[in-house]
Image (spheres, grey):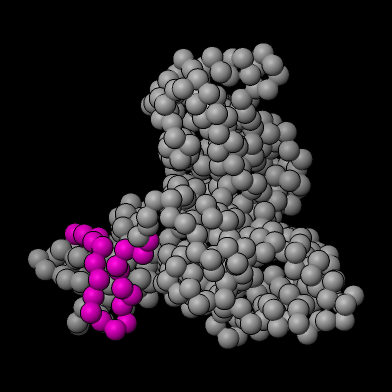
C-alpha cells in the first residue's frame, strides 16, 4: 500500500471518529509525507494545525495508523508543502506590514481598517475559528461555506469575519466583498420596496463574491426579510460565492428563524468563540498597549488579566483608559503600582474595574478547562459519564453562581429543557451536602472563578 492510499484509509477512519468540524479543519488538510523505521511524518498546511493535531489528536492519528500498518508508530507533525496537485499550498497565509493602510476596495466594502488578522490575538477561545478562516481565505466559496461564527458580546466575531474580508481583498482586489449588519439588509429591503426599486436591491446583493453578515439573529421574526435573504443566500451559495455570518447564538437556538434558513446556515461550518482565557487576556492587554504606544509590564499585565474577565471589547476599553492616563503623565512603561492606584481611585469614584466573575460563558469556559474538556463537548450531546458529571456541575454553578434561570442554563448547555437542568441541580446539591470530594471539587472551581 503506497503512502497516499494508506493516508486515505487513516483519514476515512478519523472522519468517523471525529466531528465534521474537527475533521474538515484539522484532519482533511493533512498528508503522510513519509513512513520510515516506524516514524510517520505528517504534513500540515499551517503551524496552528500542526500544533493542534500534536496536542489534541495525536492518539487518534496513531491508533488509526497503527491499525493499518500493524505496527507501533511514532508521529511527527510538520508544516510542509507538496508538489501534489491535490495538496493545498502551505505558504504562510498571512504576511503583514504593521499599521498598513487599508485598501480603497476594503473601505468601499464596509470593512473597519483595524479589523485585520494583524490585530487579531489568537488563543484557546478562537483558534478553531481562526484555523477555519485560513482555509476560507485560501479557497473562498469552497472551504466551509457558509461559515457561521457565534458567541457572546465582544468576543471578536466581527473582527474575525472582517479580517477574512480584508485578506480576500488583499489577495484579489477585484473581488466584490461586502460587510453589513443584518439589520441594514432589512432596512434597505424596506426602502427598495417603498421606492419600487426591488430589482436594484437584488442585483446589489446577488452580484457579490462574498457577503459578511453581522448579527444574523436580527432577521428572525421578519418574514419578508427572511424570504429575501433566503433567495439571496441561495443565489450566492449555488454559484460558489462565500457567505460568512455571525450571531450571538447557534442557528437552531434563534427563535423565529425559519427552518429552511437554519438548515442552510448549519450546512457549512458552525464554530463558537468563547470569552478569552487568562493567557489570551494577557496577550490582548500587551498587544493593545503596544498599539497605544505604551508598555504594560508583566506584573501589571497579570493584575489586569486576573481582573478583566468579561470579553475582548471590555479589555480593549480598559487598556485605552490606562494608555490615556499614562501618556498624560508622560509614562511609556506602566507598572503594577500605577494600575493599582488608578483602579483604587476608580473604585472610589464608583467606576470599578470590571470583575464580573459570574459571566456565564466565562464560567462555562472555566469548568471546561477544569475538567480538561472543550466547551463544545461540555455543551454537546455526549452521554459519557465524565462529561455528564462535568455538565451537571456546570449547570449547578450557572444556577447558583451566575443566578441564571433554568431555561437560560438549558440553552447555554446545548438546548436542554428545564427539567434536565433541575435534575442536574438536585443531584449535585445532594452530592455537595453528602460527598466531601464533590464539595471540595466545586469549591475549587468557585475559587478559580
Q: Is residue 77 magenta?
A: yes
Q: Main secondary structure of the magenta part?
A: loop
> Which quadrant is the N terminus positioned in?
bottom left
Q: Nearer the viewer, residue 316 or 90?
A: 316
Q: Is residue 402 magenta?
A: no
> Which quadrant is the C terminus positioned in?
top right
How far across and how far down the image is residue 254, in percent? 74, 60
How far across and how far down the image is residue 226, in percent? 78, 72
Is the residue 366 above or below the residue 254 in the image? Answer: above
Residue at 53% x, 37% y is 366
Highlighted range, magenta: 74-94
Q: Nearer the viewer, residue 327 or 155?
A: 327
Is the residue 436 above or below the residue 61 in the image? Answer: above
Residue at 35% x, 60% y is 95
Residue at 38% x, 71% y is 28
Residue at 73% x, 60% y is 217
| Tally of numbered discs | 0
How far across and how far down the image is residue 406, in percent? 75, 43
What is the residue that sits farthest to the right in this orientation? 194
How far across and how far down the image is residue 131, in percent? 43, 60
Q: Give left or right: position of 129 versus 400.
A: left
On the question of residue 99 being in view, the answer is yes
Q: Give left or right: position of 82 versus 431.
A: left
On the question of residue 432 being in view, the answer is no
Quadrant hosting residue 176: bottom right
Q: Give left or right: position of 65 versus 368.
A: left
Quadrant hosting residue 249: bottom right
Is the residue 327 above or below the residue 229 in the image? Answer: above
Amino acid at each position: 500500500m503506497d503512502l497516499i492510499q494508506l493516508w486515505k484509509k487513516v483519514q476515512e477512519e478519523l472522519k468517523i471518529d471525529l466531528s465534521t468540524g474537527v475533521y474538515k479543519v484539522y484532519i482533511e488538510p493533512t498528508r503522510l509525507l513519509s513512513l520510515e523505521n516506524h516514524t510517520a511524518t505528517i504534513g500540515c498546511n499551517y503551524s496552528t494545525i500542526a500544533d493542534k493535531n500534536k496536542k489534541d489528536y495525536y492518539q487518534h492519528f496513531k491508533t488509526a495508523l497503527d491499525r493499518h500498518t500493524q505496527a507501533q508508530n511514532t508521529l511527527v507533525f510538520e508544516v510542509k508543502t507538496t508538489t501534489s496537485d491535490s495538496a493545498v499550498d502551505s505558504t504562510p497565509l498571512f504576511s503583514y506590514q504593521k499599521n498598513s493602510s487599508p485598501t480603497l476596495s476594503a473601505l468601499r466594502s464596509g470593512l473597519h481598517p483595524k479589523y485585520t488578522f494583524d490585530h487579531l490575538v489568537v488563543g484557546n477561545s478562537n483558534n478553531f475559528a481562526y484555523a477555519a478562516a485560513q482555509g476560507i481565505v485560501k479557497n473562498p466559496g469552497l472551504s466551509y461555506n457558509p461559515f457561521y461564527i457565534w458567541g457572546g458580546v465582544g468576543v471578536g466575531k466581527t473582527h474575525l469575519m472582517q479580517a477574512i474580508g480584508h485578506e480576500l481583498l488583499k489577495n484579489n482586489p477585484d473581488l466584490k466583498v461586502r460587510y453589513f449588519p443584518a439589520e441594514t439588509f432589512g432596512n434597505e429591503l424596506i426602502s427598495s420596496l417603498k421606492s419600487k426599486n426591488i430589482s436594484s436591491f437584488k442585483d446589489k446583493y446577488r452580484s457579490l463574491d462574498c457577503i459578511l453578515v453581522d448579527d444574523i439573529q436580527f432577521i428572525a421574526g421578519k418574514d419578508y426579510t427572511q424570504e429575501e435573504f433566503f433567495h439571496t443566500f441561495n443565489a450566492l451559495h449555488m454559484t460558489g460565492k462565500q457567505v460568512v455570518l455571525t450571531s450571538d447564538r447557534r442557528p437552531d437556538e434563534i427563535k423565529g428563524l425559519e427552518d429552511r434558513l437554519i438548515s442552510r446556515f448549519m450546512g457549512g461550518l458552525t464554530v463558537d468563540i468563547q470569552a478569552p482565557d487568562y493567557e489570551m487576556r494577557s496577550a490582548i492587554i500587551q498587544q493593545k498597549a503596544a498599539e497605544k504606544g505604551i508598555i504594560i509590564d508583566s506584573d501589571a499585565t497579570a493584575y489586569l488579566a486576573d481582573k478583566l474577565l468579561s470579553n475582548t471589547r471590555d479589555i480593549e476599553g480598559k487598556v485605552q483608559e490606562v494608555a490615556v492616563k499614562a501618556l498624560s503623565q508622560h509614562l511609556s512603561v506602566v507598572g503594577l503600582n500605577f494600575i493599582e492606584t488608578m483602579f483604587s481611585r476608580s473604585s472610589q469614584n464608583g467606576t470599578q474595574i470590571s470583575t464580573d466573575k459570574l459571566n456565564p460563558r466565562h464560567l462555562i469556559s472555566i469548568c471546561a478547562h477544569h475538567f480538561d474538556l472543550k466547551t463544545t463537548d461540555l455543551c454537546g450531546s455526549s452521554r459519557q459519564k465524565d462529561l455528564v458529571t462535568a455538565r451537571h456541575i456546570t449547570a449547578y454553578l450557572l444556577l447558583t453562581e451566575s443566578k441564571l434561570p433554568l431555561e437560560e442554563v438549558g440553552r447555554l448547555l446545548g438546548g436542554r429543557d428545564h427539567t434536565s437542568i433541575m435534575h442536574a441541580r438536585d443531584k449535585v446539591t445532594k452530592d455537595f451536602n453528602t460527598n466531601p470530594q464533590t464539595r471540595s471539587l466545586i469549591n475549587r472551581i468557585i475559587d478559580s472563578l
